Image: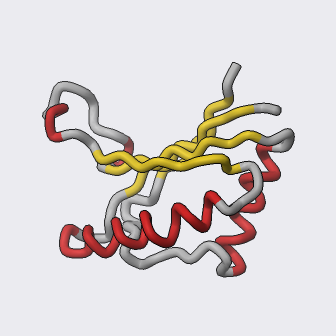
């Protein structure tokens, strides 16, 4: 089966809502996304303060990244299922998730 990593860069809606954003992401969002067939695991990371200004900023200056490991014959189908679950409410989105700048999402396939 093709394996891939779905990389999603995000930020909280505001600094004041960072705790709410992290609680939603860890306690609600990750379990809902990993319940999608083909999503085998997920892990979040925060940009390290040790980085300082040594490297370029992430697109949109996002400080958080979620890595979702995918393992499925139909990777596009997994992404379509995630989108369908967001659309019908089975994956709950929070207004604590920043929309400006918008999250950045990209899939990298193993080769």
- Looking at this rendering, what residue extends furthest in the right direction? 73
Quadrant of residue 109 within the rendered picture: top right
Task: Choose between 26 and 84: the one closer to the eye.
Answer: 26
- Tell me which residue sits at (74%, 69%) in the image: 84
Q: Is residue 63 left or right of residue 109?
A: left
- In the displayed structure, 107 sits above or below 41; it is above
- Tell me which residue sits at (72%, 53%) in the image: 79
Task: Choose between 74 and 87: the one closer to the eye.
Answer: 74
Task: Choose between 68 and 99: the one closer to the eye.
Answer: 68
Which x, y percent locates residue 57? 28, 37
- Looking at this rendering, what residue extends furthest in the top direction? 111
Task: Choose between 62 and 78: the one closer to the eye.
Answer: 78
Quadrant of residue 17 within the rendered picture: bottom left
Q: In which quarter of the image is the C terminus?
A: top right
- Tell me which residue sits at (31%, 75%) in the image: 20
The colour mode here is secondary structure
Q: How many labels does the image show?
A: 0
- Tell me which residue sits at (82%, 52%) in the image: 77
Which x, y percent locates residue 30? 52, 61
Q: Quadrant of the N terminus?
A: top right
Which x, y percent locates residue 99? 41, 67
Q: In this view, does 48 lie to the left or right of 101?
A: left
Which x, y percent locates residue 83? 70, 64
Q: In this view, does 5 lie to the left or right of 97?
A: right
């Amino acid at each position: 089966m093709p394996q891939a990593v779905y990389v999603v860069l995000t930020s909280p809606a505001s600094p004041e809502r960072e705790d709410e954003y992290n609680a939603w992401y860890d306690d609600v969002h990750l379990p809902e996304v990993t319940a999608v067939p083909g999503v085998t695991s997920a892990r979040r990371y925060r940009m390290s303060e040790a980085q300082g200004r040594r490297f370029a900023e992430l697109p949109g200056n996002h400080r958080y990244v979620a890595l979702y490991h995918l393992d499925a014959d139909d990777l596009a189908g997994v992404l379509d299922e995630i989108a369908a679950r967001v659309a019908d409410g089975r994956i709950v989105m929070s207004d604590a998730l920043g929309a400006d700048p918008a999250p950045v999402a990209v899939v990298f396939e193993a080769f």
